[in-house]
Image (spheres, helix red, strand yellow):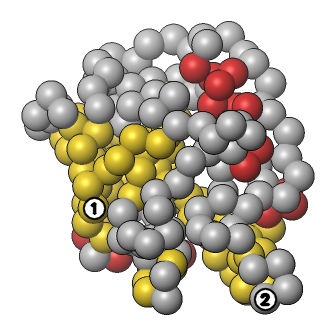
Amino acid sequence: MIRKTLAAASVALAALLAGCSVGSTTAAPASSVPPVSSAALPKSEPVSLDIPRIDAHSSLVPLGLNPDNSVQVPPVSTPLQAGWYENGPTPGEIGPAVVLGHVDGNKHKGIFYRLKEMKPGDDVDIARRDGSTAHFEVTKVDQVPKDVFPTDAVYGDTSDPELRLITCGGAFDRAEHSYVDNIIVYAHLVNGGQ
């Protein structure tokens, strides 16, 4: 089931750049399948991301799981490349679709360098392979310590199409070569298929 795979992958999801990893988290409990929303779009692979507020534009590459069950991330050598977790819902389907991006990498700003500047009401558009665009509106932006990553809030079943944008943030721990926090943007589908 998609939710079980997505929840299992969440343990190390925030490994968004070299040394950027989640602290201890637990997988989200499995729950019943939510009812289908009439606003949901059919499954279609996302191809690009557009976030006007932070001037973020990227193609989207599919990301799976590493052998240790951590989520793959785009190469640090291409920090402006965003990716979507292909084992979860596609953007516009029922459930939380997840898009990952670097805050920085290879001594350059990453695609989500300004993600912390997002505000409720901001727009996120994801173009899909079927020619439609899933238009999302931001509902919440969180900065949370990695050791208390909100697994249920990020990966738990939802009754509507939702989106999560995730990157590293907060202070950089030079000893650990890792940022201490995650920036998580929550959004919901407001108009799809256009």
Residue type, label 1: Ser
Asked if labels 1 and 2 touch by Cβ distance under 8 angstroms, the answer is: no
Query: Where is residue 22, by image quadrant?
Result: bottom right
Label ID, residue 58 = 1
Of badges 2 and 1, the one in the foreground is 2
Front in this rendered view, residue 176 or 94: 176
The residue at which mark 2 appears reads as: 174
Residue 17 x/y as whole percent: 59, 68
Q: What whole-number distance in Å separates the C-alpha atoms at marks 2 and 1?
A: 29 Å
User: Where's residue 127, x and y in %?
Assistant: 20, 44
Return the residue nearer the eye: 140 or 182. 182
How many residues crowd mark 2 within 10 Å: few (<14), some (14–19), many (20+)? few
The dot on residue 192 is none
Three-letter code for the amino acid on which mark 2 is drawn: Arg
Q: Is residue 123 visible?
A: no
Instruction: Locate residue 179: give its quadrant.
Output: bottom right
